[in-house]
Image (spheres, helix red, strand yellow):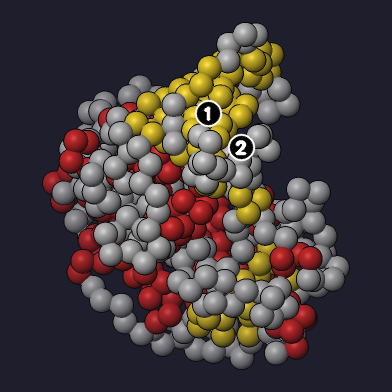
Amino acid sequence: MANMKIERQAMPVQDPAVRCHNFEEVAQGYTKEQALAEASRCLHCKNKPCVGKCPVAVDIPAFIEKITEEDFEGAYQIIQKSSSLPAVCGRVCPQETQCESRCVRGVKGEPVAIGRLERFVADWHNAQSSVETASLPSNGHKVAVIGSGPAGLTCAGDLARLGYAVTVFEALHVAGGVLMYGIPEFRLPKAIVQREIDGLKAMGVRIETDMVIGKVLTIDELMEQGFEAVFIGSGAGLPRFMNIPGESLCGVYSANEFLTRINLMKAYRADSQTPIQHAKRVAVVGGGNVAMDAARCAKRLGADEVYIVYRRSEAELPARREEVEHAKEEGIVFKLLNNPVRILDDGSGNVGGMQCLKMELGEPDASGRRRPVPVEGSEFVLDVDAVIMAIGTSPNPLITSTTEGLETYRWGGIVAEEATGKTSRLGVFAGGDAVTGAATVILAMGAGKTAAKAIDFYIQKTKA
């Protein structure tokens, strides 16, 4: 009989006063007892509305039912049929706008904590088992995957299960893409990402790092080496700036650089060979998850004051509600309905403050959100000595500029069919942020799955 309790099981977390001084994981995960109690809230709806909103179509009621039976390994196997990265998705997937938004229990209370249950199952599996080499029969075909982020890893894993010899080419020295360089340790421990990658390697997936496609090798050269299809999942790693005066001052960072130096180069460690400036008053411009990550990292580096400067109101913040709440608990100050217009020079080429305008919401723009408009005569200076721009990213043009016949959008994204990932170049598929611009991990994974299926169909049809 279902547990009809309206509230979901609370997630145990580190105390805010403690965690804002360390990079250890904030959310501690459910205990067995909490997972069983939460799983019993599921009504196991026959039409499975939650599954329809999952980009990788995990059979959610089925894996939750296995939890209630205390068959945690069985639950993991159900998830793994659809998701190559369950421990990752259980931590960073925005379930509240996807599967949980369709949960029937959410009509008169809180939805079932699907993401937290997925994390519990994945963590239980990882604690109980070791990565073992899987013996998968080869089908004799080769596929190249560019980028080892969520789209690339998912595509590689699905193709490996079908018997393809898959080689993943990663530009950085560590595989994992945004999972490694973009999301902080306190939200997604890197050991968890590495374990997922090791699992793909055990299936036979080859990963070559320090391979900048478009520079070291081109897509044409990959084809000449015998790869029968190529998937581009290179993400959107080119930072955007506001193009306001003062952005070239020392102490102005893109969120990409700031987070990469912290996450990949461990700049927060005392013995780091690539230390980062420990500013005392930091402004982070933007309102998404990346902005929250950058702000919380700055706090952990010892900043006395950290501000989120966002030109709309809290209701329009694109970040996950949980990340906003955690940031507030850690003392991040939200300067909403404010917009930077100039970064000031302290006289030595360093940041000496940021001039802002107060805003108010006007009529809706093309996106449907109310357009922020400046309040006349409202200029003020925010006293900061570092500024982090977290206003979005674009795909790096290196691959598209070195590949003939690959159609792109004006803003840099690769044109690809949504249902297949096919591009304008025969045998070349694309998905994830390289196509859509910066989006979520789970949407990139969905694109990787879609492309893997289409690549299999293409090769079996044309190469058989």
Neighbourhood count class around disc 1 (C-alpha, 10 Å): few under 14, some 14–19, many 20 upward: many
| Horizontal and vertical percent position of residue 190 | 34, 62
Compared to residue 242, the image places residue 448 above or below, namely below
The quarter of the displayed image where residue 448 is located: bottom right
Number of labels in the image equals 2
Label 2 element class: loop
- Image quadrant containing the N terminus: top left
Residue highlighted by disc 1: 354
Under circle 1, the secondary element is: strand
Residues under numbered marks 1 and 2 in contact, where contact means CB atoms less than 8 Å apart: yes
The three-letter amino acid code for the residue at tag 2 is Gly
Q: Is residue 151 above or below residue 459?
A: above
**203 shown above or below 250:** below
Find residue 40 and name its label: none
Q: Residue at x 69, y 81 (%)?
A: 217
Residue at the spot 50% in from the left edge and 63% down from the top edge: 177
State how far apart marks 1 and 2 are (Cα): 9 Å
Is any part of residue 86 visible from this angle?
no
